[in-house]
Amino acid sequence: MNHNDSTTAGPLAIELPKLERSLWEPRALFSSLMSLVTWLATLIACVPLFSVLIMLIYRGGAKLSWRVFVELPPTAFEMGGGFGNAIVGTLVMVGIAALISVPVGIMAAVFLAELGPDSRIAEVTRFCAKTLTGMPSILAGVFAYAAVVLTTGTYSAPAGGVALAILMIPIVVLTAEESMKMVPRIMKDAAYGMGCTESQVIWKVVLPTAMPGMITGVMLSVARAAGETAPLLFTALFSGYWLVQGGELQMMQPTASLAVLIYNFSGMPFESQIELAWAASLVLVLMVLVINIVSRLIAQKR
Amino acid sequence: MKANGSNRPNSAAPSDSGSNGNHVVIDCKANEIYYGSFLAVRESHIPIEKGKITAFIGPSGCGKSTVLKSINRMNDMIRGFRFEGHVHFHGLDIYDKSVDPVAVRRYIGMVFQQPNPFSMSIYDNVAFGLRLNRYGGNVGEGVEKALQRAALWDEVKDKMRNNGLSLSGGQQQRLCIARAIATEPSVLLMDEPCSALDPSATRRVEELMLELKEKYTIAVVTHNMQQAMRVADKTAFLGVDISQGGRTGYLVEYGDTKQIFEDPKEQLTKEYIRGEFS
């Protein structure tokens, strides 16, 4: 024993710290247990998401064919049919909503971020916009019903567009303001230092630099609007016909949309309609997915 | 000097130009500069002579940058800013009510402490000012000329379409200088242009300043006394007065750089240069 000590460690040998992992030590045990819990929580959070996607692909994919894109919805006992008019209706109404909300939202954001960031009106606007993002979407429908449907006397695509625009404006305002605030102070100084007027600084420096962020915000609001059902129930209603009839655009009439089609058809006791509702859900999810991917690509391209 | 403004005094040149025969482009007389109720600078009269480099030195918080930025009204955007005094530029007070600060900045360019190229291509960065002023000539030639004068052309001529932010810090600062001189301002203000750069990039910018003074009048704020000695013809030393409770900057001494560093008249300047306080 004595002989062994002197050859391996020498007279000044110190005891080496114990560095091996011991799995059953309480702290280590707690640590691995918590890792397992967080992992399980992640899994649970993913289950509904993936099960919806898988179900949509399974049930909706079966019915998906070129016919659903070009044909009109079937009436009660008809078989087959499609939802071409609902796709067109959704695109038209989201388009109208974007035409209203993007200019209004971005100009409001310019005021909030650049012109009067600390003014009373800016504070009130910001507060309202934040409140409106959490507003139940059905209220936007009620408002558009009162403002557009009652005054024009008919359910229509513009009424639906207005309802969706009300939902989109606060999202556009807040994201655009945020991305304009991200433009570094020193870049604006550079522009002022060269003799830019305030509007030139906004046009030539702030807006181009903030563009990717603003586009992301617009895309996200478009994606949200495309999936909304409640605001359209009071405003655009639904229709079994095309928006263009006999070569004429009939805007001021009830208009179909994917979201309302899903809502209507999924409650019907007919197999054909239920299948169409599945297919429409898949198409809607794919549309939103594409919008999200495109906005991501734009945001990355810096 | 153009004589088309009714509010330009006949004898615009301040007293300095008479005594030593040098032409003063900007006569900056800051009696009092306020931020809100805070008196930042008082009684600082600094003439800036044509074709020379004037350095502003002094301890932190002495208001060097405040005075510099007052010269092209960059402080106007700071809330509560108030300037008492005058800044005569070719005989016209740029703080006159009839003067548009935006127009002032087109003649008195600025280079900032942090290199601040726009998030656009190198070419567009330099062309920015030319397009802004609806440049009559060939924009491409103007861009090349400015980049050559900023000693950056050889490094970027093959990548004009790259983003300005992809350049190194020193290159970015020279890009900013190119951008500022593209519009041919008569005066260039530089607010600690090298403090964010490494020594070799600093050296390049200093060489550039010496070349540029042939064409442009330069006023530069610097923390670095060696830099002032290397580049400046004239030096203004500002000190801080803390006797009133606040920190108010004021001009202690102004003169030829050689005289300020070798034979300062004021005790305070002497102490500062010897490094007894900062």
Image: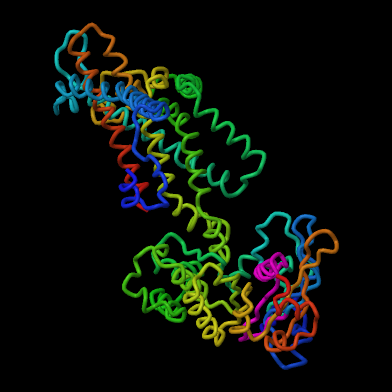
Say whether residue B96 is left or right of residue B210: right
Magenta segment, which residues? B47-72
Residue B134 seen by the camera: no
Say whether residue A237 is left or right of residue B199: left
Say whether residue B243 is left or right of residue A282: right
Residue A13 image point, x, y percent = 40, 49
Asked if the magenta segment contains residue A32, the reply would be no
Residue A192 seen by the camera: yes
Asked if the magenta segment contains residue B69, the reply would be yes
Residue B85 image point, x, y percent = 79, 70
Name the residue: 24% across, 18% down.
A277
Residue B147 image point, x, y percent = 43, 77
Placement of the C terminus of chain B among the 4 image quadrants: bottom right
- Residue at the far right in the pictured view: B244
Name the residue: 54% across, 31% down.
A130
Q: Nearer the viewer, residue A31 or A207?
A: A31
Is B92 rendered above or below residue A238?
below
How many marks the image carries: the answer is 0
Residue A99 image point, x, y percent = 41, 38
Is B155 rendered above or below residue B214?
above
- Residue at the far front in the pictured view: A2
Placement of the N terminus of chain B among the 4 image quadrants: bottom right
Name the residue: 27% across, 25% down.
A50
- Structure colour scheme: rainbow
Is A232 rendered above or below residue B271?
above
Q: Nearer the viewer, residue A234 or A189?
A: A189
Q: Quadrant of residue A59?
A: top left
- Residue at the far top in the pictured view: A269
